[in-house]
Image: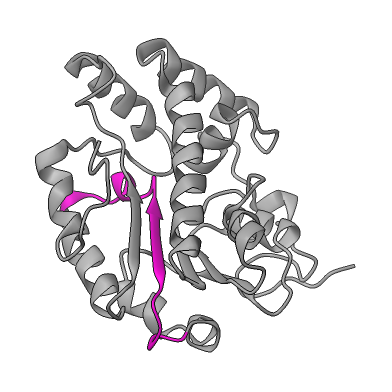
Amino acid sequence: MGSETETGVTDQGFLPADRIDTSKPHPARMYDYYLGGRDNYEVDREAAEQVMLMAPDARASALSNRAFMRRAVRNAVKEGIRQIIDVGTGIPTSPNTHEVARETAPDVRVAFVDNDVIVAAHANAKLTNEGNSAFVLADLRDPRAILEHPTVRALIDFDRPVALMLVAVLHFIDDADDPAGIVATLSGALPTGSHLILSHVTADFHGYKERAGEDAQHVYRRATAQLTLRGRAEILPFLEGYELLDPGLV
């Protein structure tokens, strides 16, 4: 039998059954359901179906987001990036960040970061650790803790360019937690030549109606993390200091 670590995850990478809360929908498991995964429960599926009734393109948007991630990672690696910090990585879905990156360069190092023990359990069970990838349990709302984490420092050389990934995560950060400041702190630790890969839920596109966005937010209020919709004007400050590649913020 495996022993339980301080994160609540066994040394075999599993979360004890009595630590899994199935009374509330979980955003990472809902996202897994949007993507057609199996790492979700009835409560997650019901909530995700409610969201899709209000926003019929939610599943297509999730799949599009994964496609964006793959394109952006491939581009970063082709541009010479060999280090990635994937913050808010979520439940691993193949092909994951390290798999995409290593299609082009097998030596890419990846630090996966998330603040959720459920994600940690899946990551420890599914992500291969070959000495050049690791999972770190840390909170995006404390960016310095991420930057100073011993595992991150051991894996990532901050004197060389890094791809910072904030894919579909900042919409779970409330305005009161200063998401722009969080991005600035993380970006400020990276050298010239680094990349920022960022996506965010918005009501600006795809024909969303304001009421539909509000209704979807209401579903997430019952989940373990709430959703904050932002428009283009609110997202652009996250990209300050970076040169936008075509097609820009879309």
- Residue span colored magenta: 157-175
Q: Is residue 68 left or right of residue 151?
A: left
Q: Position of residue 145 (x, y in %)?
A: 37, 79
Is 233 drawn above or below residue 136 in the view shown?
above
Q: Residue at x 41, y 13 (%)?
A: 56
From the viewer's side, name the closer residue of 198 and 152: 198
Is any atom of residue 170 visible in this view? yes
Q: Residue furthest right?
A: 1
Q: Residue at x 19, y 38 (%)?
A: 230
Among the 4 quarters of the image, the one containing residue 57? top left
Q: How many marks?
A: 0
Is 177 drawn above or below residue 133 in the view shown?
above
From the viewer's side, name the closer residue of 128 and 211: 128
From the viewer's side, name the closer residue of 51 and 147: 147
Which corner quadrant holds the C terminus? top left
Q: Residue at x 59, y 29 (%)?
A: 33
Q: Residue at x 44, y 37 (%)?
A: 65
Q: Is residue 124 left or right of residue 168?
A: right
Q: Position of residue 246 (x, y in %)?
A: 27, 45
From the viewer's side, name the closer residue of 206 and 45: 206
The question of residue 244 being in magenta is answered with no
Q: Position of residue 84 (x, y in %)?
A: 48, 68
The question of residue 166 being in magenta is answered with yes
Q: Is residue 189 left or right of residue 14?
A: left
- Give the colour scheme of this rendering: one colour
Is any atom of residue 114 visible in this view? no
